[in-house]
Image (cartoon, rainbow, N blue to C red):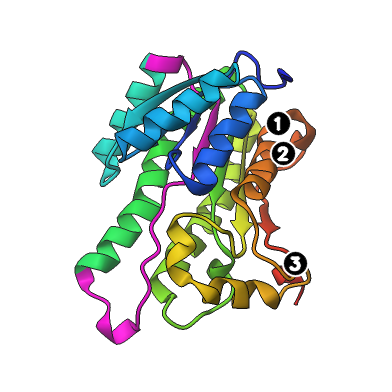
Amino acid sequence: MTAELSGSTALVTGGTSGIGRATAITLAGLGAHVVLSGRDAGRGAEAVETIRAAGGKADFVAADLKDAASARELAARARELGGPIDVLVNNAGIFPTGPTADFAEADFDTVFTTNVKVPFFLVAELAPEMAARGRGAIVNVSTIVAKNGMAGMAVYGASKAAVELMTKAWAAEFGPSGVRVNAVSPGPTRTEGTAAFGDGLDELAAAGPAGRVGTPEEIAAAIAFLVAGDASFVHGVVLPVDGGRAAV
């Protein structure tokens, strides 16, 4: 096991399945003590056991991220378990779809709370501490829908477009203090959450040069690159990991 992130602690939100779980496993494989959060305690325990069985360090925090207070509480619990947080991966998110005219106000508010407000206040809580230590890395998980308009995805796409702008603003704000802030923009990726799209996921992926759906592990590898030392001169980017969809 390589130890590139040895001695560091990483907080991965939405870490019990899909991209988040793959990211937690990947960062633990690089030597980080990973604290992963999610709503499902059973899946959280399974992810932690997988990491520990491979010789890694991991803990799970059950968290229903619904407001600024819950974000701050998660940050506090992560510190209790792993010490100062060196890496933050804002992966937790929801992506309901539907016609604009039928989208309920409550659902609109929930999307922006989960996808925008919670990452904002996690960064507000943790980035100043990273800056005070002179080092840290933050990666936000976006989507190709933040740039490419798709019917039924107005609210989800808008929330992730906000995340991409915050990524650049945070890079400008915290980069001079040694904190690198970047984002990944996944294309069609096979996860538990995207299973509901059925054949539509494959049809969307077929339009890209890779011609196939991505895996959570491929997105996790890009996140690990942005977190680790090889990306030491990378600030404020939104890295497409989309099978080439950005090229067409």
Q: Mark 1: give few (<14), some (14-19) or many (20+) Cα within 10 Å.
A: some
Q: Position of residue 198 (x, y in %)?
A: 49, 71
Q: Earlier in the sequence, mark 1 or mark 3?
A: 1
Determine the residue positioned at 65% across, 33% down: 176
Determine the residue positioned at 27% across, 59% down: 110
Q: Secondary structure at mark 3?
A: loop
Tell me the CA gap for discs 3 and 2.
18 Å
Q: Mark 2: give few (<14), some (14-19) or many (20+) Cα within 10 Å.
A: some
**Residue 31 within the magenta-colored segment of the rendering:** no
State the residue in front, 99 or 41.
Answer: 41
Contact between marks 2 and 1 (CB within 8 A): the answer is yes
Determine the residue positioned at 51% across, 52% down: 166
Q: Is residue 50 visible?
A: yes
Tell me the CA gap for discs 1 and 3.
23 Å
If the image is split into quadrants, where does the N terminus sit? top right
Q: Position of residue 96 (x, y in %)?
A: 36, 67
Q: Which mark is residue 228?
A: 1
Where is mark 2, residue-wise? 225
Q: Secondary structure at mark 1?
A: loop
Three-letter residue code for mark 3: Gly
Where is mark 3, residue-wise? 244
Find the magenta span and give its range: 81-105
**Residue 84 within the magenta-colored segment of the rendering:** yes
Residue 111 to residue 180: above or below: below
Q: Position of residue 87 (x, y in %)?
A: 55, 29
Q: Secondary structure at mark 2?
A: helix
Three-letter residue code for mark 1: Ala
Question: Mark 1 or mark 3: which is in front?
Answer: 3
